[in-house]
Amino acid sequence: MSGGKRIRVLVAKPGLDGHDRGAKIVARALRDAGMEVVYTGLRQTPEQITEAALQEDVDVVALSCLSGAHNHLFPRVVDLLRQQGGSDILVLGGGVIPDEDIPGLKLKGVSEVFLPGATTQSIVEYIRTHVPIT
Amino acid sequence: MFLLHELVQGFQCGDKRALARCVSIVESGGVRAENLLAAVAKEGKRARLIGITGPPGAGKSTLTARIAEVFLDRGESVALLLIDPSSPFTGGAILGDRIRMHAITGRRGLYMRSLGSRGSLGGLSRAVPPVVQLLECFGFDTVIIETVGTGQAETDVVSTVDTVVVVSVPGLGDDVQAMKAGIMEIADIFVVNKADREGSERTVRQAEEALKLQPKVVPVLSTVAISGIGLPDLVVALDSHYAEMLDSNELATRRKARLCTTILAHAGSILSDALTDWAEERMARAWPEIESGSVDIFTFARKLATEFQTRGGENDC
Amino acid sequence: MEAKKHSERKSSFKNTSDIELKRVYTQSDVGGDDCDIGLPGAYPFTRGVQPTMYRGRFWTMRQYAGMASAEESNARYRYLLEQGQTGLSVAFDLPTQIGYDSDHFLAQGEVGKVGVAIDSLLDMEVLFSGIPLDKVSTSMTINAPAAVLLAMYIAVAMKQGVPPTKLNGTIQNDILKEYAARGTYIFPPRQSMRLITDIFAYCAEHVPEWNTISISGYHIREAGASAVQEVAFTLSDGMAYVQAALEAGLAVDDFAPRLSFFFNSHVDFFEEVAKFRAARRLWAKIMRERFGTQNPRSQMLRFHTQTGGSTLTAQQPDNNIIRVTLQALAAVLGGTQSLHTNSRDEALALPTEESVRIALRTQQIIAYESGVADVVDPLAGSYYVESLTNEIEKAALEQIARIDALGGAVKAIEQGYMQREIQDSAYTWQQQVESKERIVVGVNQFQVRESAPRGLERVDEAVGERQRAKLALLKGNRDNARVQAALSELERCASTAENVMPAVLEAVLAYATLGEVCDVFRRVFGEYRPEETLA
């Protein structure tokens, strides 16, 4: 186990929401699935998330928000990534997100949204099938 | 997928996105990495290389951020490599050191990258030396590597940097003397962090005692990284150490040792990979005898090595 | 064959605290511990803190509520009071909880989303408009800026002509669990403790009927802890607060009677009942033996309960009504002083009026129809319940000892011990759910194809704009000289060892904003930065 490309994921909590149980579980599950997970903790601005994603050259940015601010924060991250050369990065969302908001988020560039009850396995599978093997 | 020459161009223009992608390619290793390194090589490009090591809980990350902050404030460009342990079972890793770098996130001239140790026992992944070289070519003034911090003697770091800073804390439960063998030998500078805690003076004294046994002079400093206390002295010590090494030619000596180690390590890993591939089938065939013990494994290994060395007509590795 | 006739569903039965459950409990499981079971209202209060409990008065039915701006929340409070709730519980939005005004850049998208936006006394006055503060008790879920919101509450009451001595209520004011589990901290630990002990001292003198802290296990449990961990970590936090108050020079019997607690009511029915009883017994012993309290009221663990939000599902949301009923019943049989029942749409959005009404009715039906409130501690004497109470007490004591060995709750949190324990439990739970070792009805078994839920409560994005406009207007209309003077005085005071409350009160009365007051504290105290990370 030395060289070779591993899937790199940034797990991020944008905004003021402090509920990180889910984000931490997802991070662990991705690690257990052999991925390298950069976790940047609470209270990240979209700017900070974008900078970390680009410096770490991640394949995926997984955003978690349970405070209802997702419609503002998630598209902002997508926009910043696109502006700064990160359009190829997969953006995923999770948290407390009404079903009716999902189409709008997807239109704005969030690839998939995982709702309460989603299994960590489904997230691992999604990433494995959607991250191109270079 | 990016074309190599586009990446190289971006890299040479100072594009941080291109840099980040290049780090990934170099980390993945193989011929692609070697080609990239050759393409971006810049003669004479050097950075000051600092390694920060020590047991978990010592506050290495906070200290690293503070040191970087001072360098950034005086106009230097800084690259930070933050190493975290990879799972020996899955190969995955949680890279959480960035959390502690909030004091410096967003600073111009700063690049931070988290790396998994990827199975290396010496505390640094095999990717670190080539990534360091990449960062030097990009033009960073200083590269700081913060190691895993498992508490073992992380001897890899010595052969990777110019200055090794060992960070400890008072009241870890162990006396400084009980610290795993080797950690005192590798220190160029010894720091007792969280020095506002009880027992810090004793820890400093113990460190000074232990370091007396070393052939070189190693300063022992106290810091409280979280508030910045002791940082100015630490930076002076770092600058002095570097200046001394420049003057005394020690820097060139270490660099030579570092390059030789890296060359041999890289060549060795190429050979090792080739050997593993080549030997797989032979070992499978010989397995019944190995298992039953009718052939001694060490004799078998020597035979294997000799055969591998003298094999002809097969592909170069 | 015997074995086949008596085979069981699982090879072992364990509750959330990993305690092995026997098939049947008998007299021998309880042994001769009658003296510890005792009577309600008598040390060690296993059976309840009052002799009459719900025969005297039902628990307070106190639904956590708040959304958008003060006007909407005021309307919801009046609705709930009309529908029979007997106490108010205020939910603030995240910017308010973290000491930011609605016009702060970090507040974008967050204003009014998880609770009411309070930027100044102006909003607070609207929030309680038409609600007599001498007649209604109010619990405020506010932690880092608790001093400011308490001052605003006192100010609103003053304007209603109600003196602080008549005020009944609670502020959560429990910063340790913010670091360990909830995440809405502002200042570093030591300075936060100073604010907390300032509040203890101020209220002991000026607001004597006020519960100055609600030492919380709810959030620790929600973050993934087991029942035993919930008890152990909460009581350890409690001990840290008592210690801090003593070190600040307060006499224990002066402030201890006003400490209160806040627990979760989770899925395992009997484990929860036993948990509440064990917690009461443990705290009583700790207060008497460790802190030498003389006053029995200092030994009584009084608590509010909220049914576990994280146990509710987005799938088949009506099922949540049943879950909440069982959890509420456990809390009542466990002797809670006050109760919030979650609404069925908990996993989806803030509750609609109808959903919160059903949640309130759940409590009312338990109280008025089921008969369980007519006898105190009715489950006492059950071999299972008493045995489990003992086991939880014992296991929690072991956990507390481990935290003691680390130097107490504050050190344990600084070293990331509590956080790691909680994370490990959370991960174990998730693995159990994904492997179907633990069934969640509607999620990993008995699923149905569902259409997206309709009619969910939504907070208008325009709330943020309206709050920002209000702020601009306020800053133009108030006496800015008075505000500046008040903030300067507050800064001076905060930099010394003086009690900050009077200065906060003056600032609030001058219509300084929450953000302005907290910025003073940020300057003087600094901001907390988490050091710990993931395992």
Image: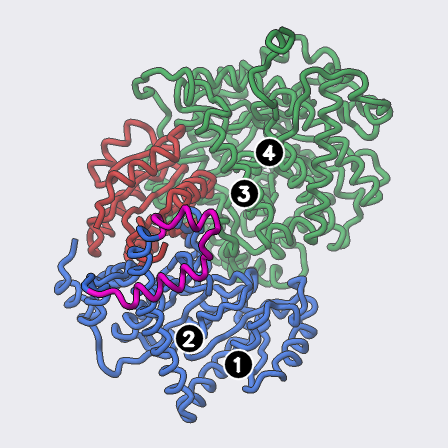
Chain colours: A red, B blue, C green
Residue depicted at x 69% and y 46%: C402
Helix or strand or loop: what does disc 4 sit on? loop
Residue depicted at x 35% and y 37%: A94
Q: Position of residue C348 (x, y in %)?
A: 39, 27
Q: Position of residue C524 (x, y in %)?
A: 55, 62
- Earlier-in-chain disc, 1 versus 2: 2
- Label 1 to label 2, Cα distance in Å? 25 Å
Q: Chain of mark 3?
A: C
Q: Chain of mark 4?
A: C
Residue depicted at x 57% and y 56%: C188
Residue designated by label 4: C226
- Label 1 to label 3, Cα distance in Å? 37 Å
Residue mark closest to the camera, 1 vs 2: 2
- The image's mark for residue A57 is none
Dots 3, 2 in contact, CB < 8 A:
no
Residue designated by label 2: B159
Residue designated by label 3: C181
Magenta stretch prevailing secondary structure: helix
The amino acid type found where label 3 is placed reads Ala
From what the image shows, is residue C509 above or below residue C224?
below
- Viewer-proximal residue among B162 and C173: B162
Label 3 crowd bin: few (<14), some (14–19), many (20+), radius 10 Å? many
The amino acid type found where label 4 is placed reads Ser
Question: Which quadrant would residue C234 be assigned to in this image?
Answer: top right
Q: Position of residue C199 (x, y in %)?
A: 66, 47
